[in-house]
Amino acid sequence: MRDVLYLEQIEQAEALLKPQRIEVLRQLAEPRSCTEVAAALDQTPQRVYYHVKRLVEAGLVTQVAERRVRGINEGVYQASARSYWLSPGLVGRLGLRRAQDELSLGYLLDLVEQVQADIAGLDRTRPELPSLGVSGEIRVRPDQRQQFFDDLKTTLQDLFARYGGAEGDAFRLAVACYPKEEETDE
């Protein structure tokens, strides 16, 4: 089972975006038969099989075994991945985004789409995929915001200059800075 399956075909998205199928898919995190899934979801095996068949056709579920139960062959199925990402290209872009302004949300969305596509394209069968994820929260007063952005940009430009040679393994560095909604206590 893969960690992530990147969905780029509209048929895959259509198969996935049905609440009943999502529930079936969750049940198939571990190998199970349609009868077992049906019992867990309080549905008929025929109804579950219909959804499983569509998920198999879309490549979201695979048959991993077959067993004989009361003289009938019963398939055992498992989800193809632990999570599924929908390609932003499935929806397409509505309207034009403004120029590539580093301080715009449009630029940030383009960056996130690029990172998503890059990660989906990685060969996960390789024994080593060195990567780093860092997340944190920084509080900046409005009068210090521009200085913060300038400092961040200077730091990153220094890293690009220091490690941007033509030799060695290539890595993409993407940094996102965006407003965080305040959590409210209710």
Image (cartoon, rainbow, N blue to C red):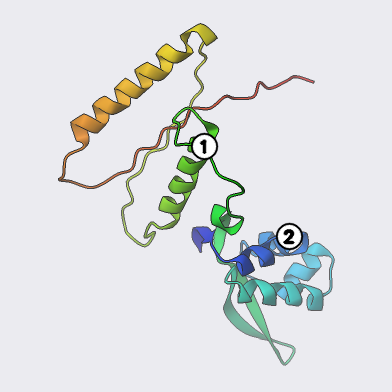
Q: Percent x, y for residue 105?
A: 54, 33
Q: Percent x, y for residue 8?
A: 54, 62
Marks 2 and 1 in Cβ contact (< 8 Å): no
Q: Quadrant of the C terminus?
A: top right
Q: Residue at x 51, y 22 (%)?
A: 137
Q: Is residue 43 left or right of residue 3?
A: right
Quarter assignment of residue 180: top right
Q: Is residue 166 left or right of residue 174?
A: left
Label 2 element class: helix
Which residue corresponds to mark 2?
23
Query: What label sits on residue 98 in the rendered view?
Result: 1
Vertical placement of residue 17 versus 181, above or below: below
Label 1 element class: loop
Q: Residue at x 35, y 17 (%)?
A: 151
Q: Residue at x 57, y 71 (%)?
A: 59
Q: Between 105 and 99, which is closer to the camera in this rendering?
A: 99
Q: Gap in Å between the C-alphas at discs 2 and 1? A: 39 Å
Q: Between 38 and 170, which is closer to the camera in this rendering?
A: 170
Q: Is residue 132 left or right of residue 182?
A: left
Q: Between 153 and 86, which is closer to the camera in this rendering?
A: 153
Residue 141 visible in the current orientation: no
